[in-house]
Amino acid sequence: MAVLNPNNWHWVDKNTLPWTKEYFDENIKGLEIPSGASECMYRIVEVSKVAGDSNVSQRKGKPICYFDLSVEFKLDVIPNADDADKASGSISLPEFMHDDPDFEIRTSGLSNELAGQVAREFLPDFRKLLLEYQVDLLKTHSQDLQDSK
């Protein structure tokens, strides 16, 4: 998307919500993280909701991004033991925002014990992966906002 914008001075805005949905499907869906002590595998099996705003903008030659998203994922907890049952639940990010690296992550549909285990063993690595979204968003979309003339 090339635009006529001398010296990249004027405000240019690009809606990146469709790309965001694809990004989560490609980078988060299918994520597997093995547990430490509890001998199971955590797997994101579905990205069930991506809603809100995601944009990359450029003003005075500087690319910026801003997003305010509500995102939900389906999580399976798969035990390594053959005689144990798989558990399923949801993970939600009610306000995943560009200026808040300490965003809230909620779990639901899991027992209290299992929710605590997920919080200890899965969510720290999951949060790190989610924080890569902003970097990837800017890297992918900032160049096509700038006029190379």
Image: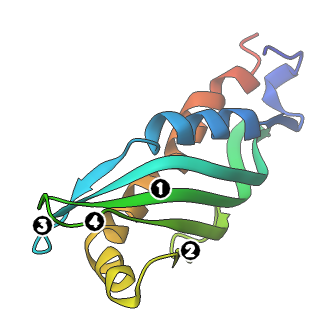
Q: Label 1 crowding class (10 Å Cα cut-off): few <14, some 14-19, many 20+?
A: some
The reply to whether the C-beta atoms of the residues labelled 1 and 3 are less than 8 Å apart is: no
Query: Mark 1 or mark 2, which has the lower sequence index?
Result: 2
The reply to whether the C-beta atoms of the residues labelled 2 and 4 are less than 8 Å apart is: no
**Residue in the picture at 33% in, 74% down:** 118
**Residue in the picture at 76% in, 44% down:** 55
Q: Amino acid at mark 1?
A: Leu
| Residue receiving disc 3 | 39
Q: Secondary structure at mark 1?
A: helix
Residue 138: horizontal and vertical position, in percent?
59, 39
Q: Amino acid at mark 4?
A: Asp
Query: Mark 2 or mark 4, which has the lower sequence index?
Result: 4
Query: Is 77 situated above or below 1?
Result: below
Query: Mark 2 or mark 3, which has the lower sequence index?
Result: 3
Residue 148: horizontal and vertical position, in percent?
71, 13
Q: Residue furthest top?
A: 149
Q: Is residue 134 visible?
A: yes
| Residue receiving disc 1 | 130
Q: Amino acid at mark 3?
A: Glu
